[in-house]
Image (cartoon, rainbow, N blue to C red):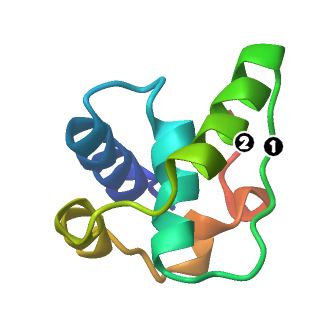
């Protein structure tokens, strides 16, 4: 299976936020906008922890940004579940 649709959606999300680094904060803020009750966040560095905390302080995304991301939604489990991704 090809991960091309996932790469395209990730690139478009990066374009909404302006950088790869902003994706952590943006993704959490998107979940807050959608009123998701729980979010599992995987971080590798203390900087990523700080970004996750900053998202909570910043609050939900404005509707305009959330709408730009909503259209990127993927539903194919083969793209959403890393356990199903092809070996590198």
Give the numbered dot on residue 42: 1
Looking at the picture, tell me which residue is in the foreground, 38 or 74: 38
For the point 78% across and 50% down, which residue is it?
41
Does residue 77 appear left or right of residue 47 in this picture? left
Looking at the picture, tell me which residue is in the foreground, 65 or 77: 65
For the point 46% across and 63% down, which residue is it?
60
Mark 1 Cα shell of 10 Å, populated few (<14), some (14-19), many (≥20): few
Residue 19 vs 6, above or below: the answer is above
Label 1 sits on a secondary structure element that is loop
Total labels: the figure holds 2
For the point 46% across and 53% down, which residue is it?
3
Q: Quadrant of residue 28?
A: bottom right
Q: Which residue is mark 2?
A: 87
Q: Quadrant of residue 84?
A: bottom right
Label 2 sits on a secondary structure element that is loop
First along the sequence among labels 1 and 2: 1
For the point 44% across and 31% down, which residue is it?
22
Looking at the picture, tell me which residue is in the foreground, 70 or 11: 70
Residue 29 point in image, percent of width and height: 50, 57
Residue 17 vs 28, above or below: the answer is above
Give the numbered dot on residue 22: none
Residue 53 point in image, percent of width and height: 72, 39
C-alpha distance separating marks 1 and 2: 21 Å
Residue 6 point in image, percent of width and height: 41, 55
């Amino acid at each position: 299976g090809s991960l091309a649709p996932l790469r395209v959606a990730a690139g478009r999300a990066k374009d909404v936020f302006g950088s790869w680094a902003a994706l952590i904060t943006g993704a959490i803020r998107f979940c807050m906008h959608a009123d998701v009750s729980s979010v599992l966040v995987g971080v590798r560095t203390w900087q990523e922890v700080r970004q996750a905390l900053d998202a909570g302080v910043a609050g939900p995304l404005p509707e305009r940004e959330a709408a730009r991301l909503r259209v990127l939604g993927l539903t194919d489990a083969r793209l959403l579940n890393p356990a199903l991704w092809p070996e590198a």
